[in-house]
Image (cartoon, rainbow, N blue to C red):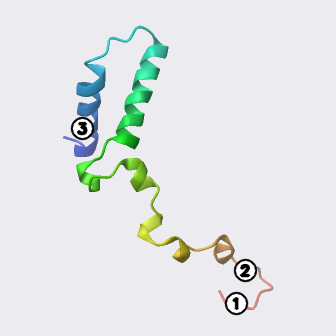
Amino acid sequence: MQNGFVESFNGRLRDECLNETLFTSLAHARFVLDAWRDDYNHVRPHSKLGGRTPAEIAGQPVWGMPPDRLPSPQTTIMKGPDSTSDW
């Protein structure tokens, strides 16, 4: 087993979608797979994510920091050579 997560995902996709659907065209396959992906990422809770969906996890701030503690774009800009900071 190369990667447990990938193997688990591939198994779910195969069992829940690919094995149950006889695709009639490429457009049909795209439609069905897009619907399955949307359900997997936005509707279905995942036990490894504490009962939340991947979309809920993706919407969280970086590293769990509250939004008021995230660096603003102004603080991440490096000062030029004529500034008084010694970097």
Q: Residue 74 at what x, y percent from top left?
A: 69, 74
- Per the model, the C-alpha gap separating discs 3 and 2 is 47 Å
Please, what is the three-letter code of the amino acid marked with disc 2?
Answer: Lys
Write down the residue under mark 3.
7
Which of pointers 3 and 2 lies earlier in the amino acid sequence? 3
Residue at x-position 70% and y-position 90%: 85
- Per the model, the C-alpha gap separating discs 3 and 1 is 51 Å
Q: Residue 43 at what x, y percent from top left?
A: 36, 41
Which of pointers 2 and 1 lies earlier in the amino acid sequence? 2
Could you say whether the residue bearing mark 1 is in a helix, strand or loop? loop
In this rendering, the answer to whether 48 lies above or below 80 is above
Write down the residue under mark 1.
85
Indicate the quadrant containing the N terminus: top left, top right, bottom left or bottom right: top left
Residue at x-position 32% and y-position 41%: 44
Residue 14 occupies quadrant: top left
Write down the residue under mark 2.
79
